[in-house]
Image (tube, rainbow, N blue to C red):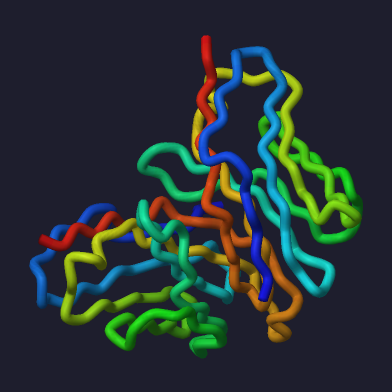
Amino acid sequence: AQSVTQLGSHVSVSEGALVLLRCNYSSSVPPYLFWYVQYPNQGLQLLLKYTSAATLVKGINGFEAEFKKSETSFHLTKPSAHMSDAAEYFCAVSRNEKLTFGTGTRLTIIP
Amino acid sequence: KAGVTQTPRYLIKTRGQQVTLSCSPISGHRSVSWYQQTPGQGLQFLFEYFSETQRNKGNFPGRFSGRQFSNSRSEMNVSTLELGDSALYLCASSLGLPNPRINTEAFFGQGTRLTVV
């Protein structure tokens, strides 16, 4: 079965600092991997996706993620945090159109 | 292009009642999936429909059911509501392909917040 593990349920960074949210996956076949963001009382918004075309994936709002097969990781990064980045972030793996989500990481931005 | 529309946004029901939630996918999308989000269990997959057929089902009791219409709109029904069914129910729409092994991007609606009292 495919799964993802997100390390750190809460991450705090200062405004302007690097954002790093960790995700490790478990999959016996090349995975479809996604990062989603959720703002309070909202649905999920797709940030970026990995579908084996390129290992470095650029998404919306300045986020990017690098697929590392040797480390089974797909960490999300942003060079400079903005106050508007405060939200919950979910890593997910897809199989047969079924998304399996990690437990989420709540990102807090310190002014 | 309109996004995924879920109705209603908020719902309060009493234990033992039943409820129906609605989802209108993005135009042209044929796959609709439903997820339950709770603080304790996180995001869990309920089921996926493609061309009016349920292709995949999560580990939920039979009280949870769904259907998809010919225009791809979907409904989810929960019968005999329990307090533990209180959750945010999210609908996701994707292009969908006959071969489900080719995964397509899922776009989510804003969800229906169900409270069972």
* Vertical arrangement, residue A111 with respect to residue B115, above or below: above
What residue is drawn where x is 50% and y is 54%? B3
Q: Which quadrant of the figure contains the N terminus of chain A? A: bottom right
- Measured as percent of width and height from the top left, residue B23 is found at 39, 67
What residue is drawn where x is 85% and y is 52%? A71
What residue is drawn where x is 56% and y is 82%? B50
User: Which of the pair A15/B50 is nearer the observer?
Assistant: A15
- Measured as percent of width and height from the top left, residue B43 is found at 46, 60
* Vertical arrangement, residue A96 with respect to residue A103, above or below: below
- Measured as percent of width and height from the top left, residue B114 is found at 24, 59
Point out the residue furthest to the top here: A111
User: Which of the pair A54/A29 is nearer the observer?
Assistant: A29
Q: Tell me if residue B48 can be seen.
A: yes
A88 on left or right of A34 = left
Q: Quadrant of residue B76?
A: bottom left
User: Which of the pair A1/B104 is nearer the observer?
Assistant: A1
User: Which of the pair A9/B92 is nearer the observer?
Assistant: A9
